[in-house]
Amino acid sequence: MLSISNLCKSFGGVVATNNVTLEFTEGSLSSIIGPNGAGKTTLFNLITGKLKVDSGKVKLDDEDITNLSTRNIVLKGISRAFQISNIFPSLTVKETLMSSLMSKNNHAEKLFNPFHSKALEEEADELLEILEMKRLSNVICSNISHGDQKVLDIGLALSLDPKILMLDEPTAGMGPEERWKMVETIERLWKLKKLTLIFIEHDMDIVFKISQKIHVLRYGSLLASGSPKEIKNNEEVINAYLGEDFEAI
Amino acid sequence: MFDFDALINCFGMASCAVNQLTSGLIIGMLLFLVASGLTLIFGVLNVINFAHGTFYMVGAYFAFSTYLFTESYLLSAFVGALGAGIFGIFFERVLISKVYGQDILMQLLVCYAFILITDDLVKLIWGTDYIAMGIPDEFRLAPFRIFGGYVPPLYAFLIILSLVIGILTILLISKTRFGSIVRAAAENSPMVSALGIRVPLYFALLFGLGCALAGIAGALAAPVRSLTPGMGFGILIESFIVTVIGGMGSIPGALIAAIILGLTRSIGSVGFPLFVDGLMFLIMAIVLIFKPTGLFVKGSPK
Amino acid sequence: MSTFTLFKKDISIALFSVLFLILIGFFVEHPWPKDFLISIFSFGLLAMSLNMLIGFAGMVSFGHAAFFALGGYAFGLLLQSESFLTNFGALSIIVAFFVSIFITGIYSAVIGAICVRLNEIYFAFLTLAFQMFLYSVIVSWVSLTGGDQGLMGGIARPVFLGIDLSNSLHRYIFCSVIFVICILLLRILNKSNFGYSLRLIRDNQERAEFLGIRVFRVKLICFVIASMVASVGGIIMTLFTSGAYPEWAFWTQSGEAIFMIMLGGISIFLGPLVGTVLLRLINDVVQMYSSHTELVTGIIIMIVVLGLRKGLVEYLLEKTGILKK
Amino acid sequence: MKNYKNKIKRRSFIKVAGLGMATTALTGFPNILKAANKPIKVGVTTILSGRVAILGQTVLSGMKVAVDEINNAGGIDGRKIEVISRDSKAKPDEAARLTRELVNNEGCEVLLNCEASGATFAVNEVARDIKKFCIHCISETSSLTADPKNRVPWVFRAARQGIHDAVGGGIFASEIAKKNNLKKFATAAPDYAYGRANTAEFMEYLKLFSPGINVTTQTWPKIFQPDYTENITALLNAKPDALYTCLWGGDLVAFIDQASLYGLFDQFQSFAVNLGDLPILTAIKKIPKDVYGGARYHKDIPDTQANEDWYNKYMAGSDVLPTNWSWEADTGMRFLIDALKKTGGDTDPMKLAKVTAGNKIKSPFGVDGTMTIRGEDHTLVNYVIAYGKTITKDPYLANIQQSNWKDIYVHEKDWKKRKKYI
């Protein structure tokens, strides 16, 4: 479904992504792991159009989407959530989702249509239901808990009706209990919406529990790819993780 | 609008070339002193001191009063700088530090209010009248003649002095303990506080230093520029242009940009006298469009 | 469903306001309230449209008054042109009105296309640079604009549809209607889908992009609309003073508009309008009782900024518990 | 007087303030109290803040001389003159707005407009609109009254007019140019309407009276520019025989100080039309010798007892020296008072206009002790236009020559024909 081939990116001489080739099949749940500075977030940024690719290709269903604008990539069905929850502080939870749905419906530039319409509100309510966030609908986003902000962030990505959902460290900054609740939410949504899901994660317990496939990056290059079982037994991965970078995980 | 013949003629004559180049330098160097303070404050405190021209004015008025009593140009320049510096520290501690890290509009308004208040205070103290300090006797000399061009001794002195002050400032920021603390605090102020250093004190001193630079420019120029309440306004706009072109936070950038501006004006007065201001804003716009961070600062805007 | 039915409430408030303003015109003999209100209409539109940039979209412009001036100058110049007046006769005012807004729209689209790519302080400085550039042009193009003396000799105000704009009552009513229409337009834009796109951009431009918002386009549209509304303010001022002046394009005019916004509060829709009224009153009252206008105004600003740390309207609403934050 | 008035008003302000601004806004500004023998209120807008605030100050002090005289003499049929002034901050739209407000709220019945040119044109339109008698006291722009398009039946000018100065100055300078064989002229003028028009008119008449003169270099510093170095060196490069400048106020002071550093005044003859204002002459620490300057206001020009008396009265009520604007404001006020006397205090604009057109009053600033506001174009004539040469000691100007108004009238008429004003 999504395939990237020979992707390269460097910043003023520092290589951030080095000749990475990966394949994500439809409906799969894959994770990307690697030490800090391995180029995981850069990879996300290259796929979603936030950064321009130096060389290499990104393809979605055999269509070349390399270096398209963020908006066009979103329209093609790839959306993402962020490492640090990335929301709209002055809007309420429901308004946030409504805004995002408005954008999906391609109504964002309608000058004279009232934002608060019944259809949009119903759509947002539905989404709130799925996210189990109904109780928060009229709370200003900057006032909800960190965990809720992260769920909302994912909700925003989900509201665009993506084929592929990319999550950058969905459990970062959470306590253990919250983490597992988040993992459950993610798995539930993945199944419910029949998504292709790609996520970056540091918590190995989570990674090995839910991933179908794991890709390991190091120094911008792909170190290994495979099922959790294969990765667990991969000599190079073990070395990498037992090496000096281990602390950083 | 453009008279290129006049330009070519001028640069064909040594005297004309000397006259215009040195006048570009003198305009540029005094501007640099003011702009270097502005850029320094922005670079470290991330605050745009819209009231910077006020300190130029205050420096000039302090120098004027000192000169009345002492008749000493250098002493009055020193008092002008010191006065502006102390006034700057007062402004920083009491007013502008209250809006650090806030909306730029808040900073703008605090500065605007401060300009209004200070201008009126100057009127109350020194009168609405324009005042001339007069050229000190030691500089009442015939101009130097270089290749037929004229260079007044006072201006030669000012160019050199401004350059020295500029270099000392750069050294102060890059080489001394004060400089390294300030730079570190600019990067990570909580960390530096944790080391037991009183960051607000250093910020205040730095702000005072920036204001003193504007003040000394005003004080040094006082003999040849008439003093009026509100005189800081014109110089403020020009030093903004310098700061934007040179890159906010870069003192060497300010130096180069100030000289560019000085030369634009001195060459412009021969070649395109009616378009000098328009050209200055145009240069600023072009820099902002193609390299918003300024010519001498690396990186791209947020 | 049409926009009219959907914004029923806002439209009825607008109708009511027009009615109220017209009643003032008819029943208050004293000319002062009309003069006062016309200047509020004019500068109010400048402040309200600037708040569409600053408050709705988070684009801090230091050069918004350029469009106010451009609208005023275009309108004044058209109505001073003999050939324009003979061509359009009684319709001159209406044609000049729309043409001036249109010219401002085109100009702001060009300036906006260059400026809106930049963020925050760089956007602010670039708009300032363009404003000062326009100011330089106005001041040095003496043969067209009259330079620093402004458009001299008054502008023609031919009667149309029985409306005679040299009559102060007619002029007042005409300006009130235009003013309310513009405010209603801003209100609708604020509450519309587009308004929420602006909020998204203001709050978090990067995330808005990842929601598929065309940030550049939305910002540019916002910039152009705000500029056109500002030009209406300039047109009202030109009608009122029967001239146009380069001071309108000077940066202090933008600065004053920013102050009006901050005085009222950027997060309340009508805050800037209240700010405009307050600034005018402060100005007038201080002028009457003190010769140190600058000192007193400066101190008042300090108190608002450092004491309240928000607009007066915001402060009062929060104090009274109507607005919770 | 002004301070005294302010004090009273401030006290009442404290009481009123309690009612709150909202009340003030609804009721209009409190000026409803009208006594039986109410004073005649004269609305004045001028520049009282910013860089040229000093000029506005000298306007108020100047007209105070005339106002005190009439009020001490019992006023006009028992009604005193009260000046209500506002600061326009030199902004035309503000001047227009304040003028309306002075009439509408303060109850001013007549207007004395003391604005520079831009704002004067704005006030001119307001006076036309609201039909109030108005005298412009400051703007020298010739077209204000010469161009029939701008003329309003009930509006007059009691100030210098650019074209008069240009003819007078042109004749004066041409004689010097002929005597000293000055051919190549350079000019330095502030880059705005006044500077450009003044320079063009002056050079036009200089060339007319002394053919063979040409302008080789023109430099245009910005108004309020702090530094003139590049303009000064441009002048030095051109090596002209003579320089003409119409810089004024603090700008002229700075220009002269900076030019002295380059020894500019030793190298060629200079004419500075605005040099003769007293505050300038006293502000410059070392006045260069032998610069020709116009007397804008000078206590010794004309050297009469009347002028001396006026100067002393002025200085008794002011802490700044009188300027050109002072005598103009005084003159405007005197014409107004004279007109009011003739109408018996009636402020009907047409009645006042009727007695003002062609009116002649006694004045220390008139050539023969009188000045006239011409009926045909509503502008002041027969005021002193004089030029002299700087000396380094008080009174700083010597060898004063007065221009002859007969010459001026002839050339003014030609000029008007050329401009198609008549």
Image (cartoon, coloured by chain):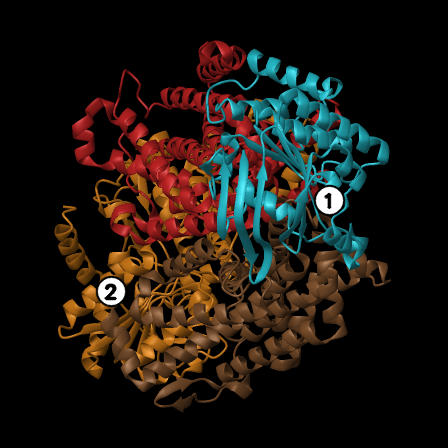
Disc 2 secondary structure class:
helix
Mark 1 lies on residue: A231
Q: What residue appears at the point 77 percent right and 26 percent down from the top-left corner? A: A184
**Which chain: cyan?**
A
Relative to A60, say whether D116 is above or below: below
Relative to B229, say whether C103 is above or below: above
Q: Chain of mark 2?
A: D
Q: Position of residue D281 (x, y in %)?
A: 45, 71
Q: Is residue C134 left or right of residue B228?
A: left
Relative to D367, say whether C183 is above or below: above
Q: Chain of mark 1?
A: A
Mark 2 lies on residue: D202
Q: Position of residue C181 (x, y in %)?
A: 44, 21
Q: Position of residue D413 (x, y in %)?
A: 15, 53
Please state which of residues B152 and A9 is positioned toward the viewer in this rendering: A9
Image quadrant in which the N terminus of chain B is located: bottom left
Mark 1 is surrounded, within 10 Å at the Cα level, by few (under 14), some (14 to 19) or many (20 or more) other residues, namely some
**Which chain: brown?**
B
What's the residue type where badge 2 is placed?
Phe
Relative to B61, say whether D7 is above or below: above
Q: Nearer the viewer, mark 1 or mark 2?
A: 1
The hue in which chain C appears in the rendered picture of the protein:
red
Please state which of residues B299 and A154 is positioned toward the viewer in this rendering: A154
**Which chain: orange?**
D
Disc 1 secondary structure class:
helix
